[in-house]
Each structure stands twice: as structure tokens, then as C-alpha cells.
Image (cartoon, grey):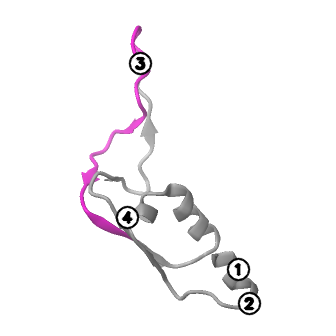
Amino acid sequence: MLDELGTVGLRPAVLIADAGYGANADFRHGLEGRSLAYALQAKGKMTAHAESAEPYEPPYGGPGPLPLSRCRRGTNGCDFTIVRH
């Protein structure tokens, strides 16, 4: 829909969306790829990391499921709004 608007010369100054879109990384990356400013609601169960955070993958210790990647620094789990301008 945003691409269709662009074909007729329209572009939103800022895009605002609810948590359903805020939780969708592909949607956010699509907005960034189109260089659109946005404000998105995010669910409280989402985790926020500093942009400089690097994932750490713990070594596998044997039988059982593989460990999940995680960041060594603390995270903030909270209700927040994602804003990019």
C-alpha cells in the first residue's frame, strides 16, 4: 500500500501503527528500507537492546536442546514505543 501511494507522489510524513506491526521485524525493516519515519507501539514482552549489543551464542553442553543466542548486557523488558526519524 505504501508503494502504491509512492507511485502517485504521496508519502506519509510519519507512519504510526499499533503493537501488531511494532512486533513485526520484517515490517520495521521494510519501513527503514523505504526511509520512512515511524512511531510503532511495542508489546511489553519485547526486549530492547542497545544498538551496539552483539549476540553471544553459548557453547553446546551435550544432550538436550541447543542454547539460544543472547546478549551479555542486561536488557529492558518494558512497554515502549519504537520511534525512528
**For residue 65, side relative to residue 27 (left or right):** left
Query: Marks 4 and 3: CB-CB under 8 Å?
Result: no
How packed is label 3: few (under 14 Cα within 10 Å), some, or many (20 or more)?
few
- Residue at image location 43% in from the left, 34% down from the top: 69
- Residue at image location 33% in from the left, 53% down from the top: 46
Real-space Cα distance between discs 1 and 4? 24 Å
What residue is shown with label 4?
Answer: 19
In the image, what residue type sits under mark 4?
Ala
How packed is label 4: few (under 14 Cα within 10 Å), some, or many (20 or more)?
some
* Mark found first going from the N terminus, 4 or 2: 2
In the image, what residue type sits under mark 1?
Glu
* Mark found first going from the N terminus, 4 or 3: 4
Is residue 73 shown above or below 5? Answer: above
Q: Say the numbered circle drawn on residue 4.
A: 1
- Which region of the structure is painted magenta? 59-82
Real-space Cα distance between discs 4 and 2? 29 Å
Position of the N terminus by quadrant: bottom right
For label 2, the SS is loop
